[in-house]
Amino acid sequence: MYIDQLAAILAKSERVVFFGGAGVSTASGIPDFRSAEGIFSKQWNRSFSPEELVSHTFYKKHPQEFFRYYKIALVHPNAKPNPCHTALAELEEMGKISAVVTQNIDGLHQLAGSKNVIELHGSVHRNYCETCRSFYDLEYILGAEGIPLCSKCGGRVKPDVVLYEESLNTHSIENAVNQIAHADTLIVGGTSLIVYPAAGLVRYFGGRHCVLINKNSTSLDHRADLVIQEDIAAVFQSVMDRLRAM
């Protein structure tokens, strides 16, 4: 059974890297924003897709509409960590997980207790004034009416989130590559591996075991030692029960 196989792999591994996507947070009630509906604008007499609405161009040209959509589709302040998040934090505490590399921006890995989290696409919990670089938390953004402005200089406050058309943080990419390249086990979970350049990071893995946990098939299935097409939160809950009993 796949639970026994994954538990055995984790028991023997010493440097595990977890690479996760939107599916990790689904059990916490956070949908993939790409599944959300776009909006039709009477002002421009056209519809905008979710990808357009969270693009750099839309942010610059239509900040009022950007923040209105951003708060609805990308910010979920009441979400809590699920068994996948808590399992990864426990595995890190056990000395198994060396890093969590995530495409998510919700901060749930840190809330669950994970320490070494590499956020490829940033975080809704970090926001900076574009003019003076003053820091603001999520509560400030949620409490602002319309476009959030800096209380110190009046500049626009931008979420530290990588929008479409923007480049990923170079330091985060290098850190993720280094962690994946030195891992003895790579677990890829809750991602379809279609969003680049982040998805291309898995090619740097050359360790012993590659495990893929996703409800649907991915381009990495043929390279994985173990493919599990089940709910990732349920999988980790069962695996942790098995590990604790070993």
Image (cartoon, helix red, strand yellow):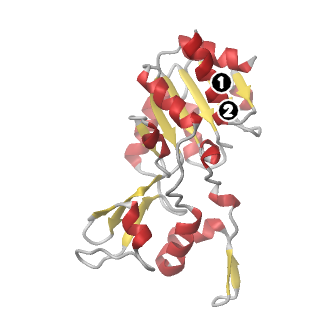
Do the residues bearing badges 2 and 1 touch, measured as CB atoms within 8 Å?
yes
- Using the image, tell me which numbered label, if any, was put on residue 238: 1
Q: Is residue 138 above or below residue 201?
A: below
Q: Is residue 178 above or below residue 138?
A: above
Q: Which residue is nearer to you in this view: 154 or 77?
A: 77
Image position, residue 127 (x, y; %): 37, 62
Q: Is residue 152 above or below residue 197?
A: below
Q: Marks 2/1: CA distance?
A: 6 Å
Q: Is residue 53 left or right of residue 93?
A: right
Q: Residue at x 63, y 90 (%)?
A: 43
Q: Residue at x 30, y 74 (%)?
A: 150
Q: Which residue is nearer to you in this view: 71 or 201?
A: 71
Q: Residue at x 43, y 38 (%)?
A: 117
Secondary structure under tag 2 reads helix
- Looking at the image, which residue sits at the far bottom? 43
- Looking at the image, which residue sits at the far left? 152
**Quadrant of the drawing holding the C terminus:** top right
- Using the image, tell me which numbered label, if any, was put on residue 234: 2
Near mark 2 (Cα within 10 A), the count class, few <14, some 14-19 or many ≥20, is few
- Does residue 225 appear in the picture of this structure? yes
Type of amino acid under label 2: Ala
Q: Residue at x 52, y 68 (%)?
A: 71
Q: Is residue 140 above or below residue 200?
A: below
- Does residue 54 appear in the picture of this structure? no
Q: Is residue 7 left or right of residue 152?
A: right
**Quadrant of the drawing holding the N terminus:** top right
Quarter of the view holding residue 243: top right
Type of amino acid under label 1: Ser
